């Protein structure tokens, strides 16, 4: 990896995290990070467990619970020290998790299915949203050309990263339109200003993106929503049902060996989700770092209003949703049909939250 890591929580310094990830070393190589015992459990000299979590874009509203939990003091209340490390795509978080560089990943649930086809077992321990919170947006210059999903053929579609959830959702919509996955070009452009610049410079014809990037594209008259996977009704229409997205996933082995740590994290995130469900978008926005507003707090709040309904209030994986995710991914990844869904998520910890 060659991207700069940011320190976004207490625990490990940004410089230490950057060195850790760039060198390919695990978090146990720094004195301030979690140390590992022989059974791979987390430990710290203060007795408070330390956990590192890489999130595929902390400024994205879909991943808001991670930073909000810190701002509300809920990690501390739960008795765990969390270091949040930011990357632009969920795919990067997935790779860091597999390499043992972080303990958990903040990304979409679909990664757990994809990884199982590659012999890697990870599971979502908290499910924070049951719709993707994404939009397939098409450049305004193509409004007269792109009218059906079939018209996506031949387009260059911006995604956060190759193999990312935005890549998977782009592929599904292309295939749903009667095309093959190879009939479009996915181009990794990240999110936020890098994606907007790619659209402005005509490097991409469309993009799968979330808020606040989607609202910024509209506000700049660059693109329009072609497929809504942001609202519940839109998601059902586009994907045939709900689609578990934002989640905390960890290796099955880590979860098995560190149940007390996982429970503390579940306690913090469920408490955060409940707080979100009882406060206004304005109150929530006031808790977030100002840089997340991208220079327009009013637009951020507007986008937040549209995305709040996507979040669960209890952190549970809704019944039947994993089956729908499996069906969607199987449309262009046949191996996903053989995935054992029972190993891709658990409600064990959120069920115990008081």
Image: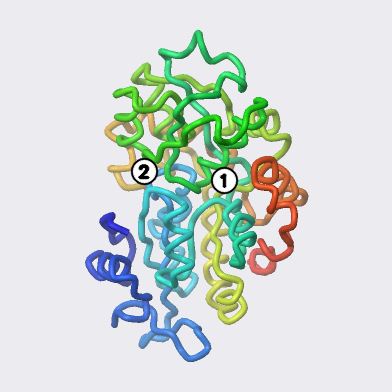
Disc 1: CA contacts within 10 A as few (<14), some (14-19) or many (>=20): some
Q: Which residue is mark 1?
A: 277
Mark 2 or 1, nearer chain start: 1
176 sits to left or right of 60: right
Residue nearest the viewer, comparing 222 with 301: 222
Give SS at disc 1.
helix
Q: Where's residue 150, x and y in %?
A: 62, 21
60 sits to left or right of 153: left
Please tell me which residue is depicted at 40% across the width and 40% down the height of the picture: 188
Q: Where's residue 194, x and y in %?
A: 31, 36
Determine whether 90 is above or below 24 in the image: above
Determine whether 84 is above or below 41 in the image: above
Is residue 281 something one can see in this rendering?
yes
Residue 239's image quarter? top right
Q: Which residue is mark 2?
A: 286
Residue nearest the viewer, comparing 1 with 273: 1
Q: CA distance from mark 2 to mark 1?
A: 15 Å
Is residue 76 something one can see in this rendering?
no
Give SS at disc 2.
helix
Residues at badges 2 and 1 in contact (C-beta under 8 Å)?
no
Residue nearest the viewer, comparing 164 with 261: 164
Determine whether 255 is above or below 300 in the image: below
Q: Where's residue 86, x and y in %?
A: 36, 55
């Amino acid at each position: 990896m060659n991207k700069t890591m940011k320190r976004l929580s207490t625990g490990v310094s940004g410089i230490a995290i950057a060195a850790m990830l760039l060198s390919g070393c695990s978090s146990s190589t720094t004195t301030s990070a979690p140390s590992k015992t022989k059974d791979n459990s987390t430990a710290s000299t203060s007795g408070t467990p330390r956990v590192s979590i890489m999130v595929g874009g902390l400024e994205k509203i879909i991943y808001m619970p991670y930073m909000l939990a810190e701002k509300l003091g809920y990690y501390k209340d739960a008795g765990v020290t969390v270091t949040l490390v930011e990357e632009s795509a969920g795919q990067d978080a997935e790779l860091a998790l597999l390499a043992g560089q972080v303990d958990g990943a903040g990304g979409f649930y679909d990664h757990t299915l994809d990884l199982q086809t590659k012999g890697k077992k990870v599971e979502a321990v908290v499910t924070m949203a049951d719709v993707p919170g994404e939009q397939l947006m098409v450049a305004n210059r193509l409004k007269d050309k792109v009218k059906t999903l079939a018209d996506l053929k031949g387009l260059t579609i911006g995604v956060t990263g190759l193999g990312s959830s935005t890549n998977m959702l782009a592929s599904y919509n292309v295939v749903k339109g009667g095309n093959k996955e190879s009939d479009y070009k996915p181009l990794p452009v990240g999110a936020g200003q890098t994606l907007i610049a790619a659209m402005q410079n005509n490097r991409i014809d469309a993009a799968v993106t979330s808020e606040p990037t989607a609202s910024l594209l509209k506000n700049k008259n660059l693109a329009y929503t072609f497929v809504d996977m942001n609202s519940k009704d839109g998601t059902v229409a586009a994907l045939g049902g709900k689609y578990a997205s934002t989640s905390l996933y960890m290796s099955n082995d880590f979860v098995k060996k560190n149940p007390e740590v996982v429970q503390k994290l579940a306690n913090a995130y469920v408490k955060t989700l409940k707080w979100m469900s009882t406060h206004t978008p304005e109150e929530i926005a006031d808790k977030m770092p100002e840089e997340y507003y991208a220079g327009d707090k009013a637009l951020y709040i507007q986008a937040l209003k549209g995305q709040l309904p996507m979040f669960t209030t209890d952190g549970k994986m809704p019944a039947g949703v994993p089956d729908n995710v499996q069906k969607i991914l199987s449309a262009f990844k046949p191996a996903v049909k053989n995935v054992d869904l029972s190993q891709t998520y658990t409600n064990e910890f959120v069920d115990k939250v008081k």
